[in-house]
Amino acid sequence: MASNMPATRDLLETPVQPTDAAVTVQGERFRRYLSAERIKKRVAEMGKTIARDYATTTPILVSVLNGAFMYTADLMRAIDTDCEIDFIKLSSYGDEKVSSGEVRELKSVDAELEGRDVLVVEDIVDTGLSMEFMKRRLAEYNPASLRVSTLLHKPTATEPDLTLDYVGFRIPDLFVIGYGLDYGQLARNLSDIYILDEG
Ligand code: PRP
């Protein structure tokens, strides 16, 4: 970790309740949980904090495809300082709602990460297997620092020792879609985030 980088601020939000607005995807009903407006506000806050923390360096964001593409585009625009971008592609869920437990790297990063300040950009940390895999994988490149950001985190589902530096929203352990997150590859284009309606 670069020694001149200040400590990360706590970015956790206040709890939210699902609304009555709903969508049906592949026969399953989901209720609107985070509005596009609320996401936008939170991502702007995260961008500001990240810009402050990396004010003296040019970080490289490593976005985890596919799910993080929308969050990455918005987060990067909210970072008002020099930064670069690269992509890695992982898969562990396929078209299912439950992790296969096996993380596969489908595309590796192209940029030279040695000596760089690397910030992973994930849409969601669920079991944490993908993020653990990412941290191990990217550490192999000997970056100067390696931090991770995730828009969503399911604390009750995740291995508690996993350190997350920038978290947008803590959410319950229910399947979520929208804003880049899919169910069977559908629903990534929804502007709001929806949560599985178990009722
Ligand atoms: C999703 C998501 C994260 C991962 C989180 O990816 O984008 O990368 O799962 O889950 P975990 O914490 O349980 O590992 P997915 O495998 O569904 O691929 P996708 O990003 O292409 O949708």
Image (cartoon, grey):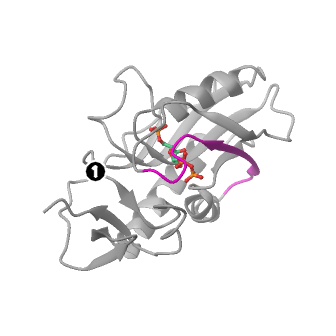
- Looking at this view, name the residue that lies furthest to the left: 199
In this picture, residue 56 sits left or right of residue 34: right
Residue 187 visible from this viewpoint? yes
State the image coordinates of residue 129 (x, y, percent, origin top left): 49, 30
State the image coordinates of residue 126 (x, y, percent, origin top left): 40, 40
- The image quadrant that residue 71 belongs to is bottom right
Is-magenta flag for residue 198? no
Which image quarter is the N terminus in?
top right
Residue at figure coordinates x 49%, y 60% from the top left: 181
The residue nearer to you, when weighing 50 against 162, is 162
- Which range is magenta? 81-96
Q: Secondary structure at mark 1?
A: loop
- The image quadrant that residue 139 belongs to is top right
Q: Which residue is labeled 1 in the image?
A: 174
Is-magenta flag for residue 88? yes
The residue nearer to you, when weighing 175 against 52, is 175
Q: Amino acid at mark 1?
A: Leu
State the image coordinates of residue 72 (x, y, percent, origin top left): 61, 58
